[in-house]
Amino acid sequence: MTPGVGLGWPSTYNTCRVSSPLVAPAPIPRWRRPIKQRSRVERRSGPPHTRVTFSHPSELEFARFLDFYRIRWAYEPVAFPLGWENGRATEMFTPDFYLPEHDLYVELTTMKQSLVTPKNRKLRRLRELYPEVKIRLLYRKDYEQLLAQAGYAHADLDHLRDDQIDRILVSPLELEARVRSLARRISRDYEGRSMVLVGMLKGVTFFLADLARQLTVPLAIDYLSITRYARSDPSGARRVTIQRDLDYPIRGRHVLLVEDVVNTGLTLDYVLSALRDRDPASVEVVTLLDRPSRRIADVQPRYVGFQVPSDYVVGYGLDYRERYRNLPFICALRPSVYAQDAEDQESVAGEQRLVALPEG
């Protein structure tokens, strides 16, 4: 908490005096305004939770928690005056965190009743004076509720452990905003034309569904499924073949191929060649994730969601052994999760191999 005694309010406001210790008079409306705090940032580099000097270890823990889940925050950005006497603020309340994406203030507390009681009193006073402000008093047990509000459903995280997930690369809010942005751009480019969305199964499922809902042009949806190697080949050579073909002809149609990850581009180059042989009006590519540093084939998606490092990524449709697809974010798996299965990964259909396979 940041004490508010000594703030220099103009003497013209001296009419607001506390006539009773039990009933606080309504302050002049101009007094009911938050006061911007000075920046708490001490350093400009490193993860956000390392740049701030916190007042309590629990605040550092919570900031690290927010950073891990890619939730934006500010530490003690404003203070709210709660009481006045002789034209001066005599009581202030400074929430610990502000989450701008949710317009929500968060105040942390401990389980000690002696600390909870005065904080609850201040929160009641704050809500009375500033009814438009959203604020929550957060206990440790409330973390899961905050996760749900930020888009991380508890059920989706039940099977995750700290030794499985290295870090979250793209949060649910970032995914939602980027898909909406891509849809606006694609809708502008294809205005006045109809299109065919061709999804590359299976990792593209969630991305294609969310993208299609945001598009404003007439469209049809079809799917392709490819296999990247032939198990029957005694030489063990990997080959790309179409396993599930399109249901409808695309001759003369505008085709947008929807990919989950573009790595070397070898698989994408093969699929584009196969589609162009069918004489469409145009063929373009939109990919959720891109790794241009690993490109071998000379292909460039026209629309790109995010560039990501060469980690094994899962979530939002991407899987490892058909697990993690339903995570609402995209995260990097720890190498220890899949290293033990390196020898038999090739026998698993639909799995992603960032080093050996052309595509994710």
Image (spheres, rainbow, N blue to C red):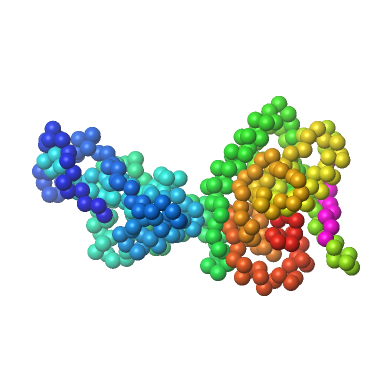
Return the x and y of residue 26 as percentages of the image width and height: 19, 39
Report the residue at 59% width, 66% height from top: 334
Q: Is 42 placed left or right of 310 in the picture?
A: left
Res 128 → quadrant: top left
Report the residue at 55% width, 69% height from top: 163
User: In front: 328, or 178?
Assistant: 178
Give the magenta part as a residue range: 238-248
Q: Is 347 placed left or right of 73 in the picture?
A: right
Residue 240 colored magenta? yes
Q: Is residue 262 above or below residue 343?
A: above
Return the x and y of residue 30 as percentages of the image width and height: 23, 34
Count of numbered badges drawn on the protein: 0
User: In front: 316, or 78?
Assistant: 78
Report the residue at 59% width, 55% height from top: 330
Quarter of the picture holding the C terminus: bottom right
Report the residue at 66% width, 54% height from top: 317
Return the x and y of residue 136 as percentages of the image width and height: 36, 52
User: In front: 83, or 113?
Assistant: 83
Quarter of the picture holding the N terminus: bottom left
Q: Is residue 249 above or below residue 111?
A: above
Return the x and y of residue 32 as percentages of the image width and height: 25, 39
- Going by the picture, which residue comes out furthest to the top? 192
Residue 179 colored magenta? no
Viewer can see residue 93:
yes
Q: Is residue 136 above or below residue 248?
A: below
Viewer can see residue 25:
no
Q: Is 97 placed left or right of 334 in the picture?
A: left
Magenta: main secondary structure: loop
